[in-house]
Image: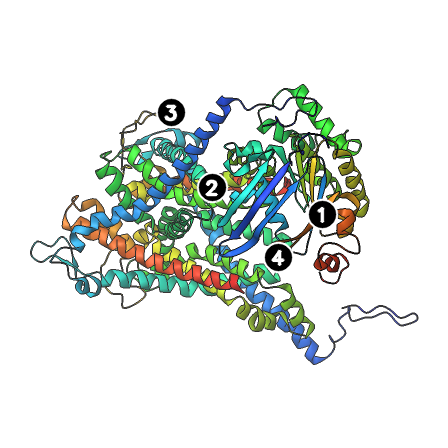
Amino acid sequence: MTPPGTTRSGARPGRPFVSLAAERAMEAAIRLSGISAIVFVLAIFFFIFREAAPVLFSDEFKPLEFLFSVQWYPTSVVDIRYGTLALTAGTVGVTLVAMLLAVPFGLGAAIFVSEFCGRRLRETLKIVIEILAAIPSVVWGFVALTVISRLMVSYTSAPVGVNMLNGGIVLALMSVPIIVSIGEDALKAVPDSYREAALAMGATRWQLVVRVLLPAARNGLLAAVLLGVGRAVGETMAVLMATGHAVQIPHGLLDSVRTLTANIAAELGEAPAGSAHYRVLFLTGIQLFILTFVVNLAADLAIRGVRRK
Amino acid sequence: MHEPLRPGAPARHDGGRPFAHTSFGRRKVRQEAAARAVFLAMTLLMVAPLVAIVSHLVIEAWPALSLEFLLDIPRERMTTGGIWPAFVGTIYLVVISLAVAAPIGVLAAVYLNEYAKDSWFNRVISLAVINLAGVPSIVHALFGLGAFVYAARFGFSVAAASLTLAIMTLPVIIASTREALSAVPMSFREACWNVGATRWQTIRGVVLPNSTSGILTGIILQVSRAAGETAPIMFTGAVLYKAVERGTLLPYYLDDQCMALSMHLYVLTTQVPNVAPAIPYATAVVLLGSVLLVNGSAIGLRIWLRNRKRW
Amino acid sequence: MTAAAAPRAKIEVEDLRLSYGHREAIHGISFEVMANEILGVIGPAQSGKTSLLRCLNRTIDFVAGAHVSGTIRVDGEDVRAMRDVFELRRRVGMVAPLPVGLPMSIYDNVAFAPRCAGLRAKGDLDAIVERCLRQAALWDEVKDRLGSLGTKLSGGQQQRLTIARALSHQPDILCLDEFSIAIDPVTTMRIEDVLKELKRDVTIILVTNLTQQARRLADRTMFLMAGDLVEIGRNEVVFSDRPARQQTYDYINGLFG
């Protein structure tokens, strides 16, 4: 074969064998990391399932009772029962209260930041939102136990400051940043031509928002709300400290409840490793997994709907 | 909108709003102002609690806040004294967990984005990352307990707690690194391949240097997340109390249990009676302040990177 | 008649087929490229012109789902059997349609390929950078600011930078894929002059959608349409009133796009 490039001056630079080997090594390390990361990520699902499996597949396990009974007596001496309905109701109740507060204010703030706001104010507000989002959940729990609890006792008829309302307020404050930032993205994604057309027809900004922007951005706004819900459902420490400890279906805002997440945190320390109680807690962990998976999937589908437009 | 003045025409007195004198125009202007006011109020209602809470925390914490508070150890059954073991414990946990998660996460993202882009791997990981991003922190605690404390036999230890935090931050690091890598246009890679560069030479020469800032931002944000989490460490290695000398820099071994700021706040609030009231507030302020400092540097990095755009 | 053997073609393509998944993009074409000639490649969009170039330097390997069969030989060596594909890519320079300045200094842009090949000595790199920038008719404009970012140059300058980059690894073969699409006519003319100079040392394949450009620059021209090789021959024939195929005449004279 004719050596290439010899018609011109200067020999071709050769590739030292060492650097070639070093490169192969680097590419191997990258592949190894990629695969091990996948393994670790999948390991989470695997392990939780493994710990829960003996109970899940045992003969005594009754799924209907597990899901729909309110009787949760894991440490009873005479009659152990594992019904999670009260816990699920606690989760749902607290999340509902939180969303009733967070969605209007969050969407309202998103609309303000996106449509009514000058550039300076927008930058400031975005920083405020990032700060809100960064506050650790245990600090929120602390605030719930001290500040909100005291206000609750002073201003309402609640005997104790920790209850569903307290949890709802705290969760609302924690979910608002997500709703605002994703909601704002959704509104920004609406083409300017919509706005120009509406304003050209003489619409006020209010009409523009309600009649044009909200419908146009509804998939993204739905995703924002769903992600806020996901945040609320998955929260552990703040609700642990804010909602009281009663395992019961709440009948009023001022009732004490316990969520699925707080329940695990409260009882895991006392459940002996490998015991049925321990494994059932893992089972509720799977419940939480499924719950947050469904919510996140819904949010993802909503966002996908936006992209397809 | 302003209309151009015709020569000789009188100046306008209506501020360029030709219909402002009609009742219809007035109503619209009022509606507009009302709408703005409503949304502004909603925003303030969200902002005000934050300001109120942070100020309240700082005010209540003020008597106890000092350098001494940071360096001293808890005394008198934790009713007075400082938070040093918890502060240094958090630093331990965060540093070790990021030392594990960051390299693996970044390299894994490089693999997924540069080597395996169209493979089923990528889709599985994307799905898994979406899932894990929303997983409750208590589920990470369950995993850490089952996998590291028991199965791997690390017991309740700094090692188990750090690894739990590492697995918690890994998916998000992979996702944010992948995003930073995808921001580098494909045309750069093709230009490198055309001159005979290998995949790794292309990554090292063009892709990584131009996504470093984005990658670092993602990692820094996970630092603050790891520092603030309680549940994953509560069941894997963080404890109520551990005897430590005041101001020691390296008080824990990998198989020791440790204290941590987030755990300490939880414990002081729920399990220690008769604490001097300023102390939990001061602990909260230190934790919050550290987290905000770290996040602030990530934001600063993001702004700096925006100004340094190289294409 | 002398007993000298006919000169070996620089590039030999035999029955090349390329499919992307189920769609066949190139339907078994065969041709040769002689050393030190400029081969023009013309044809409407989606004819397989770019795909052909990608097969030549094997960047087709990066396209998922692409399947190649047939043979391409460079200097008698089958490119698909070559162990060191990076060596192949250094022998074949490639200039893409859209100008690409890498996000690094102009100096580093041109020094990138030699560095990848293992060359480190500053003196050698300096020489290569100057030589290639001169060859690409860019030296005078940038010689005082070799440290500035390659991405900040104008489109025409970036395209010349790309050519300098393509020359930096001393290729025997230079492929240009519609290089003038995104640049101004003046720069196009300057680059055409560069190509006429380069022809002495390098074999050039010039893919272009401007038939007149092929007429100006090429020795022979190949007309591809929808993955088929319609005609290949000397410019005097292809661009005459009676090329070998009626389709060629129709395309060149704008009877279809």
The extreme left residue here reads: A78
Q: At which x and y percent is residue A116?
A: 61, 62
Q: Are marks 3 and 2 on the same chain?
A: yes
At 27% across and 61% down in the image, what residue appears? A88
Front residue of this view, candidates B159 and A146: B159
Q: Using a 10 Å C-alpha cutoff, classify the residue at mark 2 as few (fewer than 14 neighbours), some (14 to 19) or many (20 or more).
A: some
Residue B192 lies left or right of residue A239; in this view the side is: right
- In the drawing, what numbered circle is on residue C233? 1
Q: From mark 2 to mark 1, how far is it between C-alphas? A: 41 Å
Q: From mark 3 to mark 2, how far is it between C-alphas? A: 42 Å
Q: At which x and y percent is residue A206?
A: 59, 71
Of the two numbered discs 3 and 4 in the rendering, the one whose residue sits closer to the viewer: 4
The residue under label 4 is C226
Q: Are marks 2 and 1 on the same chain?
A: no
The answer for which chain carries disc 4 is: C
- Kindly identify the amino acid type of the residue bearing the numbered disc 1: Gly
